[in-house]
Image (spheres, rainbow, N blue to C red):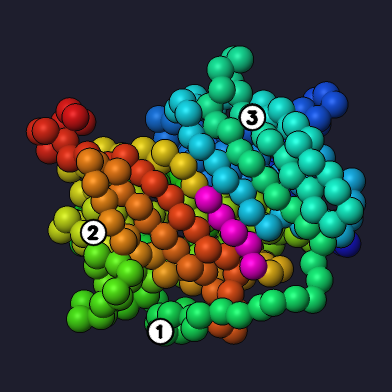
Amino acid sequence: MTAAAATETRGPLARLFDVERVDDLVWQGRSDVMTLPHVFGGQLVGQSLMAAARSIESPHAQVHSIHTIFLRPGVCPDPVRYEVEDTYTGNSRVSRQVTGLQDGRVVCRSFVSASAEGDGIAHSRPAPAAGPVHAARPLELVAAADGGLGPWWADFDAVEVRVAPLDEQGSAPHSAIAPRNFWMRAVERLPDDPAMHRAAVAFASDLMLMGVAVAAHGVPTGFERTLAKEWWGISLDHTIWFHDAVAGDEWVVYEHTTPMAHASRALIQAAAFDEAGRPVCHVAQEALVRRHRTPGTGER
């Protein structure tokens, strides 16, 4: 790798997911990519994935699922400590439990599974009819009609997000609203590390989910400022199943749906495919979403 190429691979996401080993089965990750009042959930998922992956000695075992429960809001920009437990190591399958902590307080806990790739059963639903990526609009242009993306997005440039045209007449029997399709990719070129590419996809997979939950209640897609003024929400848990090798720095389309919500708990899902229509991963998240009592005040 040339010096120039090495520089290109040290962008914000590469630094974010280059977790530092500080002890036996203990890693530490930074928290300085997004200006948020708490640590972004996608960061916690991605760094937990990296800590688990780096605890696995077999070069053939790749992470195929991660299930994360968010327990407390993390504090920005404080680092997060990840303690890994080897729950199972077999000939073809590996399982790890990862606990994320700040100042001794547990902020998240993840269960990670990995295995060696091999031949076997394989099938996939079709990719969504989202249209080509060049026909999708950059998120910041969509948000311009809402006064811009807002302060939380001000310095965020790690992931490029494009909003595919919305078919308002479209419907899906598994969703309360027509699917929302987003093209996303890491802006930087990532190192040749399969785990880091999965971590980047995990990070991106958490960016637009909350907006889909409130889209069922009248908030236009991409209106992040209106979402923040009128709604309050936190992620309760986040699950990803990876289906094949994925390039986090190439375009991936995420078809977002929300099948149901009850008692302020909304379920949001995303099926993701690359530009060739190959399945990449499936995402599911439950979020606690409530309307502010006084819009724009932050009162819940």
Q: Is residue 30 visible?
A: yes
Location of residue 22 in the rendering, given as x and y in whole percent from the top left corner? 80, 25
Q: Which residue is mark 1?
A: 129
Q: Is residue 21 left or right of residue 283?
A: right
Front residue of this view, candidates 60 and 78: 60
Residue extending furthest toward the top: 104
Q: Is residue 151 visible?
A: no
Q: Which mark, residue 215? A: 2
Asked whether disc 1 touches disc 2, contact meaning CB atoms under 8 Å apart, the reply is no
Q: Is residue 240 found inside the magenta-colored segment of the image?
A: yes
SS under mark 1: loop
Q: Is residue 177 above or below residue 235?
A: below
What residue is rendered at 86% in x and 48% in y? 90
- Amino acid of disc 1: Ala
Image quadrant where residue 169 sits:
bottom left
Q: Which mark, residue 40? A: none
Q: Is residue 246 above or below residue 41?
A: below
What residue is rendered at 23% in x and 59% in y? 215
Quadrant including the N terminus: bottom right
- Amino acid of disc 2: Ala
Q: Is residue 38 found inside the magenta-colored segment of the image?
A: no
Front residue of this view, candidates 59 and 207: 59
| Mark nearer the N terminus (1 vs 2) | 1
Image quadrant where residue 185 sits:
bottom right
User: How crowded is the residue under tag 3: few (<14 C-alpha within 10 Å), some, or many (20+)?
Assistant: many
Location of residue 16 in the rendering, given as x and y in whole percent from the top left corner? 65, 42
Using the numbered discs, state the Cα–Cα distance from disc 1 to disc 2 in whole angstroms. 20 Å
